[in-house]
Each structure stands twice: as C-alpha cells, then as structure tokens.
Image: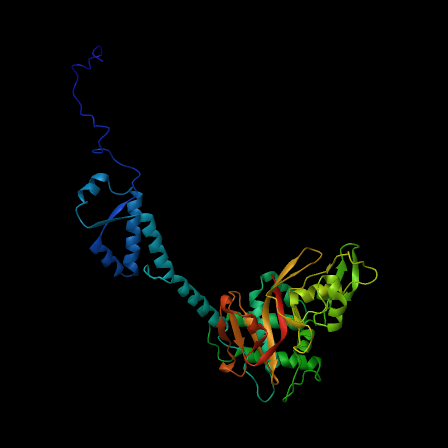
Amino acid sequence: MIHYGFETGEYIDIPDIESEQGIQTQNVKAYIEIGHCLNNQQKQTKKSETNVLENHQDVIKNNGPCIDELEKQKATNINIINPFTELQKLKRKLENKYDDNDKWPTQKKRKLLIESELNLYSTGCSWDSLNWSCAYDSIIMGLYSLYNNTNISCQQEWSTQSTLTHFLSERFNYIQANSSRNLKDNQFNILCNDFRNKLTSINPVKFPRFGTALVAIDEIISVLCNDNLIGRQMKCLTCEKKVSSLFQKTLNPHLWTKHAEDTGYSSLLDIVTIQEWSFVSITACKNENHPKDHQIVFCHTPCWLWFEVWPQVTPKTIPSLCLDLPSSNGNFQYELNTIIYHGMNHFTCTFIDDNKHLWFHDGQQNNGSPNFLKTNNQIQISDLIQFDGCVANIYIYRRL
C-alpha cells in the first residue's frame, strides 16, 4: 500500500462495521403507529380507510423506517406493528364489513348466509282450503329445494326425465332468478295451479282438480318420473347381465325377512336405516341365475331417489343422512334433501338446503313461506321421523 502511494493519500472515513450508524437497512418490515392516531383511524370513513390502506402499502414498498428513526422514538408512546398483519385486517374490514374487535365474526357470516337463503325461500305455496293442495304444495317446495341444491349436470338430467320435470325445471329457474325481486303475484301458487292442471289432464281420477280430495304423494312422484324404470334397473357385474327384478323403494316386510340374512343383517331387527334397506333391496334382485357371490349394482344411478315408509310396518325404517350405492360406474353418494310428512289428512315437508340448514314448510302457516328451523349441528334424528304432529312418509335423496 505504501508502494502505491496510499501512505500520503487523502483520508476517507470508513464506517465501523460493528456500528449500525450510517448503514441503510433493506429488510426491516416495520412502521410506527402512535397510540392516539390509532383511535382517529377507527373513526374514519370508508374513504379514509382506503387511504390508510394505501399508506400501508407505501410503507411496505419503502421497506419501512430506518433503525435511527426507531431509536429516536423509543421514549414516546409507540406501537411497532407488523404491516402485513394490519393490511390483512383492513382488507377483511373493507371486504366483509366486520369490526376488527368483533369476537364472533363467524356468527355474522352465518347470519348473512341465512339472509341470502331467506331471499331464496321468502315465499312458498300457500294452502288452498277450497281445493286441497297440501300434497302438491309439499312436493313442489321439496323438489324446488332439491333442484337448487343439485349441480348443473344433475339439473339437466332431472329436467329431461319427463315432460313434467322439464316443466318444473323451467319454472324453478324463473323463480330462482327472481327470488330477490318483489313480484306482484306468488309464483309458487301459480306454479302449483299449473302443475295440478297438467296432472289432472293426465289422470283426472287420481288427481282431481277441485274439491277436498286427498292425493297420494307417491302417485305424484310416479307420474313425475313418467313411471321411468331406468333408475331402478339393476345388473350383475360378475356375469355382465341385466337383472329382471327392480330396485324396490318401498319397504316390504316379506322382502326384508327373506333377504336380510343373505345381506348380513338379522331378519328380527325392529329398526333399520334406509341404507340397510337399500342393501337388502339390491340383494333381493338376485335370482336363481345369480349366485350369492355375484355383485348386483345399479345400471344407472338416478339423479334423485325417493323412499316411501310407513310407521306401522315392521321393521321400522329411519332415514340415513347419506347413502352409498353401487353402480356399474362405481359407488355413488346421495344426501337426504327432502322429507314429506303426513298426519290428520294434511301434508307438510322439511328440506335441507345447500348450507345444511333445515327448513319447514306448511302451506297453512306463514302464508306458505318456509320457516328456518335449525343448522346442521342442531338437527336431531327425531326431527326427520316426526315433526309438528305429522309422521314422515317420503324421503327424497339427491345424488352428489
């Protein structure tokens, strides 16, 4: 260094590497927020909240204040806050309109979900006391919920099942599209009257249009399905042949006694689930051409299934919240969607929406509008068997 003239050169101050003075920091992600300023920010409007959000972004972009400034402010009332955490809080506040100090934000979210569902089920079929309509009211409200809960693929499949399902799907789409509007007339009542007119034109004896006549729910569903047997046809995967017997949706005590043991259940059971009954019904489809070790499955799993139960039949059938049924394309899952009750010559229904909330509809109450009952964690099996003095008669499942 002396050889090259560094001894007589100009002196230059070199910062001490162990000192932080004079060294710029590039990765300190902190900023200063004075206590009294925080209270002022809480009182600002949405517009000022947006400005605060932009200021936070500027602080992050500039890598925060340097250490010298932090040292100077140590004696004052200062809170060092992570800007990323505060930015996330402000975004949540601006987007969701929740208070940062709210201890129960999930309850507010649940309330907003219920309010959105109230628009979807703000009206419903009201009972016609002159021309008894409770059977039609219950099936329309139950299927409306079923249709709203299914995916687009199932909706398309359901709409092409028969001319009546196509008719209902178009009207359901219209009602759903206008659920947030205050239409002059009750669209559900208009739909119910048109639906009854179509059924009467098909069979005026089973479906009388006027008067105080009772109608069987299963008869309405059979016509809706156009007596379509495709969803009940079975096949044997082992020998790849179709089975002549059909899947039975009504619990037959003789059928249970005969085939329960072959399925692995006791024929002396007092209570069985719909899932257990389904397995026995599948086993019952075997005949002498299909040994016990052959596997019987659905040829085609329908987009919806319904089961008819009666309280006086032994064993007593209780619902399963979910069903797992075999098919030629693998197992398919179903979820309980609608329950139709009967008692004192009157039909009512409950249904579970897509957010797992239980609703109740009785055309004689609340001007036909459904009532929100319970969330999924509050639903009891007793609610699904008997409700408001009526006993469950029909269980309707939707394919997932």
Q: Is residue 226 left or right of residue 371?
A: right
Taking 263 as reference, is 394 above or below it? below
Colour scheme: rainbow
Please tell me which residue lies in front, 169 or 92.
92
Q: Residue at x 59, y 71 (%)?
A: 338
In-front residue for pair 212/344: 344
Q: Give the camera-side residue of 195 and 212.
A: 212
Q: Quadrant of residue 192?
A: bottom right
Identify the residue at the far top of this view: 3
- Image quadrant occupied by the N terminus: top left
Compared to 361, does 56 lie above or below? above
In the rendered image, residue 278, in percent from the top left (x then y), is placed at 69, 65
> Residue 207, how many percent across, how many down?
67, 83
Residue 233 seen in render:
no
Percent of width and height locating residue 209:
65, 85
Q: Quadrant of the C terminus?
A: bottom right
Where is residue 281, by image quadrant? bottom right
Where is residue 69? Give x, y as percent: 20, 42
Q: Between residues 119 and 247, which one lies in front from this camera angle?
A: 247
Tell me which residue sits at (75%, 62%) in the image: 262
Would residue 348 be visible to someone looking at this image?
yes
Total labels drawn: 0
